[in-house]
Image: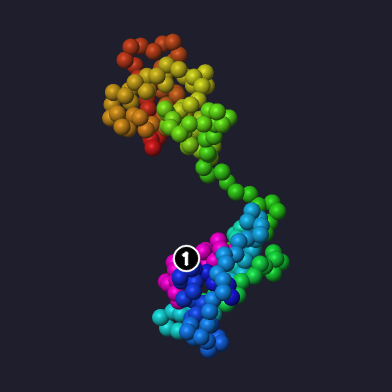
Amino acid sequence: MKLWATNEVRSKSKFWYFLRKLKKVKKSNGQILAINEIFEKNPTKIKNFGIWLRYQSRTGYHNMYKEYRDTTLNGAVEQMYTEMASRHRVRFPCIQIIKTATIPAKLCKRESTKQFHNSKIKFPLVFKKVRPPTRKLKTTYKASRPNLFISHANVTNFPKHLQIREGSRLAECLKKEFRLAVNTLRTTVSTDVYEGIRAITIDKDNAPAEGTLAHGAYPTIVKVISI
């Protein structure tokens, strides 16, 4: 008998509960020989798991079939318990797992599982993880804050504005305009806001020309993106 529990004490309790229902055997007339944890044979390969279960709600008992994609059967069962608690408000003791099986792709029924059966599936890069080039340069703390902002907007839609981002080369932007804009922000906003600035958008057309900037002539700041 395969059971899912958080520890051995609860697994023994569930074992005697089901054995008493199925075979009419009490705990005083039986003995448990061994309790072994079963591990996945291929824990690095993604698989489709089907789970047949029966649960008790506030109105009665219901049968249900669920499909999940996971690398291990324990992970699929954990997904099932989480989903049943969130969608149906079913507690852990009210769920009885009848059967589990590994389902091939052609026999899957749920659309949430079948949508991953595509050889040309693509996922967007929503988070850029900064990694050191070598393990020798890996450190726990950094002196500067990493810039993980990824913009998918087309900059060519704003021909009148020049967008200057943190970490870009000075040759790619107007040097003096950028410095004056930073000096303007340093004197007009608080220190906390200034430290969290990610990007500055400057009105390129109304800004003074290169080399003709007079003392105190600041460019027009259109937008400031902060953390």
x, y percentage for residue 112?
A: 59, 63
x, y percentage for residue 62?
A: 51, 81
x, y percentage for residue 158?
A: 49, 33
Q: Start and end of the magenta stretch?
A: 73-94
Q: Residue at x 40, y 35 (%)?
A: 225
Q: Is residue 87 magenta?
A: yes
Q: Residue at x 28, y 26 (%)?
A: 188
Q: Secondary structure at mark 1?
A: loop
Residue pushed farthest bottom? 24
x, y percentage for residue 172?
A: 52, 21
Q: Which quadrant, please, contains the C terminus?
A: top left
177 relative to 136, above or below: above
Residue 80 horizontal side relative to residue 194, left or right: right
Report which quarter residue 145 is drawn in: top left
Residue hosting label 1: 6
Specify whether residue 187 is in view: yes
